[in-house]
Image (spheres, helix red, strand yellow):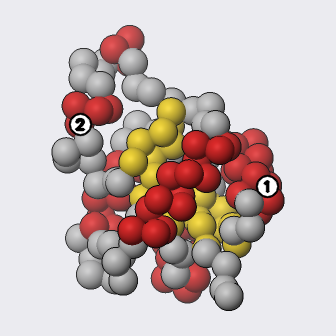
């Protein structure tokens, strides 16, 4: 049985390293990208089964823009996406909560950093089980 492939996209090398190690222990094949440009290459060649994506990288909304672009392409529109990011606070100019915005955010789930490994595993299993190919 082939391992499910997960692509983690984040500009924090520590988060990439730790999260990849945890997911490998859970039995997943893991690829990491330190930004969306690198992620595109993995998506085009490696066809991941699920993405874990940060919001704020080179720009404050790079992850959100990337997820939105993926949803516009037939090949990637059903790719499960988990946003894993620090919760945007009102001190950074956000007046709404992420839960209020999930109706327009092009992701399946939002998880706040630091992420509980067991909760992440649960959410990954849930999305992969419900994935329609």
| Mark 2: few/some/many CA within 10 Å (<14, 14-19, 20+) | few
Q: How many marks?
A: 2
Question: Residue 27, how many percent across, how many down?
Answer: 74, 67
Nearer-the-camera pick, 4 or 90:
4
Residue at the image point whose x is 38% and y is 11% from the top: 91
Q: Position of residue 38 (x, y in %)?
A: 57, 67
| C-alpha distance separating marks 2 and 1 | 31 Å
Residue matched to label 1: 21
Give the image location of residue 63, x and y in percent: 42, 50
Per the image, label 1 sits on a secondary structure element best described as helix
Q: Determine which residue is flagged by label 2.
A: 101
**Is 106 left or right of 50, judged from the image as shown?**
left
Q: Secondary structure at mark 2?
A: helix
What is the x, y in percent for residue 65? 32, 53
**Above or below — where is 13 with respect to 90?**
below
In the image, residue 22 above or below residue 100: below
Foreground residue among 36 and 19: 19
Name which residue lies at 47% across and 59% down. Answer: 126
- Toward which corner of the image does residue 2 lie, by quadrant? bottom right
| Among numbered discs 2 and 1, the one appearing first in the sequence | 1
Residue 100 is left or right of residue 40, and the answer is left
Residue appearing at x 45%, y 27% in the figure: 87
Marking on residue 13 = none
Quadrant where the N terminus is found in the figure: bottom right
Q: Is residue 57 visible?
A: no
Q: Residue at x 26, y 42 (%)?
A: 102
* Screen quadrant of the C terminus: bottom left
| Horizontal side, residue 118 vs residue 102: left or right | right
Q: Quadrant of residue 35?
A: bottom right
Give the residue at the far left of this rendering. 103
Residue lying furthest top in this view?
91
Q: Residues within 10 Å of mark 1 (few under 14, many from 20)?
A: some
């Amino acid at each position: 049985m082939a391992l499910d492939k997960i692509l983690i996209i984040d500009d924090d090398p520590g988060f990439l390293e730790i999260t990849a190690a945890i997911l490998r222990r859970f039995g997943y094949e893991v690829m990491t990208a330190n930004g969306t440009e690198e992620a595109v290459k993995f998506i085009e060649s490696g066809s991941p089964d699920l993405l874990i994506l940060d919001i704020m990288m080179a720009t404050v909304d790079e992850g959100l823009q990337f997820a939105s672009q993926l949803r516009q392409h037939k090949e990637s529109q059903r790719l499960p996406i988990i946003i894993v990011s620090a919760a945007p606070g009102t001190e950074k100019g956000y007046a709404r909560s992420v839960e209020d915005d999930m109706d327009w955010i092009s992701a399946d789930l939002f998880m706040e950093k630091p992420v509980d490994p067991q909760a992440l595993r649960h959410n990954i299993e849930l999305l992969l089980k419900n994935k329609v190919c």
